[in-house]
Image (spheres, grey):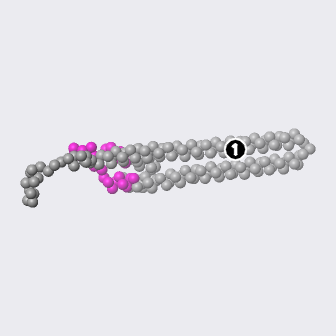
């Protein structure tokens, strides 16, 4: 089974794919008398394409978490409003019994406070999870960018301009010039 077939079921996350690329580069054969390595271009391109394809899924998952959080908050607000309405109705029926009204209001307030605390906690958990995923993705991208920059630096051959301009033609070079 090739690397490409390995990544079709189930899809790994982006970080795993990028780490696989790094491992391929780390374990690749060196080019003789060079700091460069030989890698299978098609294989690495395929892995990177899978990583790019996995990004939207991770973003969809983060959006799904946010949507779930919003739905939970809305449900908690509706339940809190229902409880408050029920408390008001009960209080109206028992106006002559102030103690019961007071107790119902206190109970409704506790439930609302609990619902608000639960919604805040869920919101913080969702934000922490998303922040954690984004931080992880940021680290992977930074590592990848560092590897890409280093790789590109290794591939560049720089000839200083001063060496090219300072060279004067030798007499041997003029030997073959028939116009001189």
The total of numbered circles placed on residues is 1
Which residue is rendered at x = 78% and y = 44% of the image? 108
Residue 2 visible in the current orientation: no
| x, y percent for residue 134 | 51, 46
Residue at the front extreme, as displayed: 180
Q: Quick check: is 42 in the magenta stretch?
A: yes
| x, y percent for residue 117 | 68, 41
Residue at the right extreme, as displayed: 96
Which residue is rendered at x = 73% and y = 42% of the image? 113
| x, y percent for residue 6 | 39, 53
Which residue is rendered at x = 24% and y = 44% of the image? 34
Q: Is residue 51 left or right of residue 101?
A: left
Q: Quick check: is 43 in the magenta stretch?
A: yes
Q: Is residue 101 left or right of residue 171?
A: right
Circle 1 packing at 10 Å, graded few (<14), some (14-19), many (20+), is some
Q: Quadrant of the N terminus?
A: bottom left
Which residue is rendered at x = 54% and y = 44% of the image? 131
Residue 66 visible in the current orientation: yes
83, 74: nearer the viewer: 74
Q: Quadrant of the C terminus?
A: bottom left
Residue at the bottom extreme, as displayed: 179
Q: Is residue 156 left or right of residue 170?
A: right
Task: Tell me the magenta residue range.
Answer: 21-48
3, 30: nearer the viewer: 30
| x, y percent for residue 56 | 49, 55
State the SS at label 1.
Answer: helix
Q: Which residue is mark 1?
A: 116
């Amino acid at each position: 089974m090739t690397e490409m077939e390995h990544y079709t079921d189930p899809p790994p996350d982006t970080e795993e794919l990028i780490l696989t690329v790094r491992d391929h580069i780390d374990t690749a054969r060196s080019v003789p008398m060079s700091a460069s390595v030989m890698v299978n271009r098609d294989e690495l391109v395929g892995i990177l394409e899978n990583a790019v394809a996995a990004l939207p899924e991770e973003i969809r998952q983060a959006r799904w978490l946010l949507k779930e959080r919003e739905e939970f908050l809305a449900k908690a607000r509706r339940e809190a409003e229902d409880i408050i309405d029920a408390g008001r109705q009960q209080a109206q029926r028992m106006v002559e019994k102030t103690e019961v009204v007071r107790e119902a209001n206190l109970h409704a307030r506790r439930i609302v406070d609990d619902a608000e605390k639960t919604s805040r906690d869920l919101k913080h958990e969702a934000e922490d999870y998303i922040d954690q995923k984004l931080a992880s993705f940021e680290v992977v991208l930074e590592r990848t960018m560092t590897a890409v920059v280093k790789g590109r630096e290794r591939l560049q051959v720089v000839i200083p301009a001063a060496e090219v301009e300072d060279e004067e033609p030798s007499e041997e070079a003029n030997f073959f010039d028939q116009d001189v």
